[in-house]
Image (tube, grey):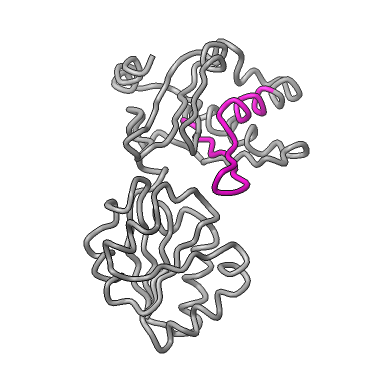
């Protein structure tokens, strides 16, 4: 039996009751720790469920997933994932592999960045395609092109920012400056220093920060909460505008 369990974005108490019940009866529990920072002490969760948790790196999860799935043929195995289950392509691959091996599978969802951005006041159905900005972006213009596509139909664009490890995150300034760099190259007049954006940090946690304002002003801000992301809004509904005023 294989459980794929989202643990949310806050602390160990964000796991659902269904998730806790699954963990308490699991023989092996793996926590992947490479697509996002966990955000809490693993020992706290271990105390909560009275079980040992095995941290899994990228190599184990992506290249040796078969060994975990083989365990799930005979034992109860849980894989814990920050946020929701399907917030990364890797997790969809796990689902496919489990189905191919005829392993019993149960998915337990949780909050992810794709729904907690509602805290900004922007309506979720007014978002277009999400774009990710990697550290090595010298030859990449896709995020800017996504922005162009979304703005052309009045939709908001969420930009997710890269991380190299649990302690090395891209910050919002790097992300915005990257978009500005491509703007200066393509010159489609999508943004300028007076364009308004929404900066988010630590969404879904007790320390979350949301700021709304002009790029030239926000770039002066110092935010030390991670992970960070930012949103370039499309056409704003009047209710969205009212809520955003709270974050000026």
Magenta includes 185? Answer: no
Residue at image position (63%, 71%) is: 63
In the image as oriented, which residue stretches furthest toward the left?
17
Q: Position of residue 43 (x, y in %)?
A: 37, 59
Relative to residue 68, is residue 186 depicted above or below?
A: above
Residue 152 falls left or right of residue 6: right
Residue 122 falls left or right of residue 181: left
Q: Tell me which segment is drawn in magenta.
A: 156-180
Of 239 and 206, the residue lying toward us: 206
Relative to residue 42, is residue 129 depicted above or below?
A: above
Residue at image position (35%, 67%) is: 107
Q: Position of residue 115 (x, y in %)?
A: 36, 43
Q: Quadrant of the N terminus?
A: bottom left
Of 109 and 172, the residue lying toward us: 172
Residue 187 falls left or right of residue 24: right
Q: Position of residue 54 (x, y in %)?
A: 46, 68
Of 54 and 217, the residue lying toward us: 54
């Amino acid at each position: 039996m294989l459980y794929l369990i989202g643990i949310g974005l806050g602390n160990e108490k964000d796991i659902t009751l269904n998730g806790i019940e699954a963990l308490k009866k699991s023989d092996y529990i793996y926590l992947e720790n490479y697509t996002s920072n966990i955000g809490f002490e693993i020992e706290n969760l271990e105390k909560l469920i009275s079980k040992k948790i095995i941290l899994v790196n990228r190599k184990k999860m992506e290249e040796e997933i078969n060994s975990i799935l083989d365990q799930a043929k005979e034992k109860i195995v849980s894989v814990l994932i920050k946020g929701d289950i399907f917030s990364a392509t890797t997790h969809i691959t796990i689902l496919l592999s489990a189905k191919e091996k005829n392993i019993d599978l149960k998915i337990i969802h949780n909050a992810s960045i794709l729904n907690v951005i509602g805290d900004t006041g922007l309506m979720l159905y007014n978002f277009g395609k999400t774009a990710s900005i990697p550290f090595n972006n010298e030859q990449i213009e896709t995020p800017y092109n996504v922005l162009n596509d979304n703005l052309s139909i009045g939709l908001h664009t969420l930009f997710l920012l890269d991380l190299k490890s649990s302690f090395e995150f891209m910050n919002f300034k790097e992300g915005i400056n990257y978009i500005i760099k491509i703007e200066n190259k393509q010159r489609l007049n999508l943004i300028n220093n007076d364009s308004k954006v929404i900066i988010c940090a630590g969404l879904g946690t007790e320390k979350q920060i949301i700021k709304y304002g002009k790029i030239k002003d926000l770039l002066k801000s110092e935010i030390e909460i991670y992970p960070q992301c930012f949103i370039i809004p499309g056409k704003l509904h009047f209710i969205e505008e009212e809520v955003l005023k709270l974050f000026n």
